[in-house]
Image: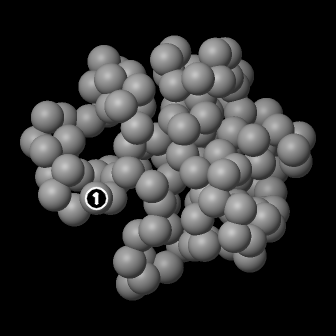
């Protein structure tokens, strides 16, 4: 089971286990299930409210997270968090090009991650 550590400047860090093998739970769903206050609005990858920074705990292991969804690409591009060159490279590598993700779109895989989220 992967460990997901949620970190925010205004809240105490919290580490939780994600369900092993489900490959359907998003960061946002795990946060909601564990009472972690990540802001969200649409829950559908269209508004950008749930923008988070995701880092692998062990950078020596290959990344396992799913590539960006089409909705995620559109929103991250609008927010200036991803470049066209990074999008093009993602199409070749089949992995997310940087640390920025939408919590409602990123599906948790079998890797330990740190999720940094803003607090209001």
Task: State left or right for residue 57 relative to residue 61.
Answer: right
- Asked if 92 appears above or below 85 in the picture, the reply is below
Q: Position of residue 71 (x, y in %)?
A: 41, 26
Residue occupying the point 58% across, 65% down = 109
- Residues 26 and 81: in front is 26
Looking at the image, can residue 38 be seen?
yes
In the depicted structure, whether residue 74 falls above or below residue 58: above
Q: Is residue 94 left or right of residue 48?
A: left
User: Of residues 68 and 56, which is closer to you in this image?
Assistant: 68
* Residue at 57% across, 72% down: 111
Q: For mark 1, what is the residue?
A: 94
Viewer-proximal residue, 99 or 91? Answer: 91
SS at badge 1: loop
Q: Which quadrant is home to the N terminus? A: bottom right
Indicate the quadrant containing the C terminus: top left, top right, bottom left or bottom right: top right
Residue 106 x, y percent position in the rendering = 54, 46
Give residue 9's quadrant in the image. top right
Q: Quadrant of residue 8?
A: top right
How far from the left and from the top, in percent, is residue 42? Answer: 64, 16
Image spot of residue 36 (x, y percent): 81, 41
Q: Is residue 48 left or right of residue 98?
A: right
What residue is rendered at 38% in x and 43% in y? 68
- Residue drawn at the location 26% of the way across and 35% of the way down: 82
């Amino acid at each position: 089971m992967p460990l997901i550590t949620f970190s925010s400047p205004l809240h105490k860090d919290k580490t939780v286990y994600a369900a092993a093998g489900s490959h359907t739970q998003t960061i946002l769903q795990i946060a909601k299930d564990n009472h972690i206050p990540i802001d969200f609005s649409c829950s559908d990858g269209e508004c950008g409210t749930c923008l988070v920074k995701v880092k692998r705990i062990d950078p020596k292991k290959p990344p396992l997270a799913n590539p960006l969804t089409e909705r995620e690409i559109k929103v991250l591009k609008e927010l200036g968090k991803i470049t066209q060159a990074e999008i093009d490279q993602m199409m070749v590598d089949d992995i997310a090009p940087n640390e920025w993700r939408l919590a409602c779109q990123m599906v948790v895989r079998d890797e330990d991650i740190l999720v940094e989220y803003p607090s209001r």
